[in-house]
Image: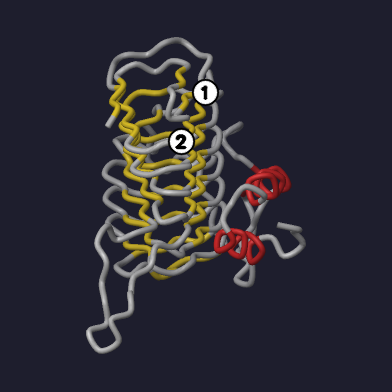
Amino acid sequence: MLQLHKLERYKDDQGNQIVYDGEIREEKIDIRFKGSNNTLTISPEADIKDLLITFSGNNGQIEIGPTTKKRAGLRFELRCGHESRIWIGENVGCAGRTFISAVEGVSVSIGDDVMFAKNIEVRGDDTHPIYDVRTEKRMNPSQSIVVGEHVWIAKHAVVMGGVTIGNGSVIGFRSIVTSSIPNNCVAVGAPARVVRRNIAWERPEVVPRRPNEQYPRKGEKSPKYWNLTDEAAILVTPRTEARWRRLARRLPKPVRRLARRLLPSSGA
């Protein structure tokens, strides 16, 4: 295993590489390559605060987008296996380290403007296999995950494989998401269930506000994410759709099938 503690452009004779042209970072950086032909691509504008990355196989890809707005910073533990992908969009923020796992050829996609609280897990796998003792067939195959744009995931929540969360939704405290959630919803519980539809949320905190103060203040509203819930489809913006089309061309067949369900008009 090769272990690096510096974020800078890198390439080795095993085909592993880091594509990064930003300021060299050495604090809280731990990047581990256990295989070959893995690629980590990080925007020079990404606000990296804490990064632990493990490529546990071959041909893995991780991409982290820029931070162009005031956010809590990027704090991730990322695990990427054989032929797997993790994609993190623009202006994502993490109050604490978020764990994301994609192995066995699956993909995890985190949309723009997602807000992670502390102690979050987004896992396309269960780490260990579970079998049916009668048939000896695997019962818990790894599955891809899509978290849309402007999603708020509260403290101690877990998002499991095979799940899609629509744009503008909120996942409540200690919730476990085991099935897909539409856009602009509040989902809570274990397993998480939709308890409120047609909602919108904004980043400014209520902590310093006066009692009975009017919401939202001028300039706080982000109209792009104020939408009615569509139970039949995941809301995907044109920008995200274009990215998915580009990404889908590089993905394994099972993930491309997921992309087709998300983007019915896609040629993925």
Crowd around label 2: few <14 · some 14–19 · many ≥20 (10 Å)? many
Q: Quadrant of residue 258?
A: bottom right
> Considering depth in this image, is 100 or 95 the residue closer to the camera?
100
**Residue at the spot 45% in from the left edge and 60% down from the top edge:** 186
- The colour scheme used here is secondary structure
At label 2, the amino acid type is Asn
At label 1, the amino acid type is Val
Residue 156 x, y percent position in the rendering: 26, 51
Residue 123 vs 134, above or below: the answer is above
Residue 77 vs 106, above or below: the answer is above
Q: Residue furthest bottom?
A: 134
Is 75 left or right of 114, judged from the image as shown?
A: left
Q: Earlier in the sequence, mark 1 or mark 2?
A: 1
What residue did someone put label 1 on?
19
Q: Quadrant of residue 93?
A: top left
Quarter of the image for the C terminus: give it: bottom right
Residue 201 x, y percent position in the rendering: 50, 47
What residue did someone put label 2 on?
38
Q: Quadrant of residue 48?
A: top left
Quarter of the image for the N terminus: give it: top left
- Could you tell me if the residues under marks 1 and 2 are in contact, i.e. CB atoms within 8 Å? no
**Residue at the spot 33% in from the left edge and 28% down from the top edge:** 31
> Considering depth in this image, is 198 or 215 the residue closer to the camera?
198
Residue 119 x, y percent position in the rendering: 26, 44
**Residue at the spot 40% in from the left edge and 50% down from the top edge:** 102
Name the disc covering residue 53, or none: none
**Residue at the spot 39% in from the left edge and 18% down from the top edge:** 7
Residue 135 x, y percent position in the rendering: 30, 87
Crowd around label 1: few <14 · some 14–19 · many ≥20 (10 Å)? some
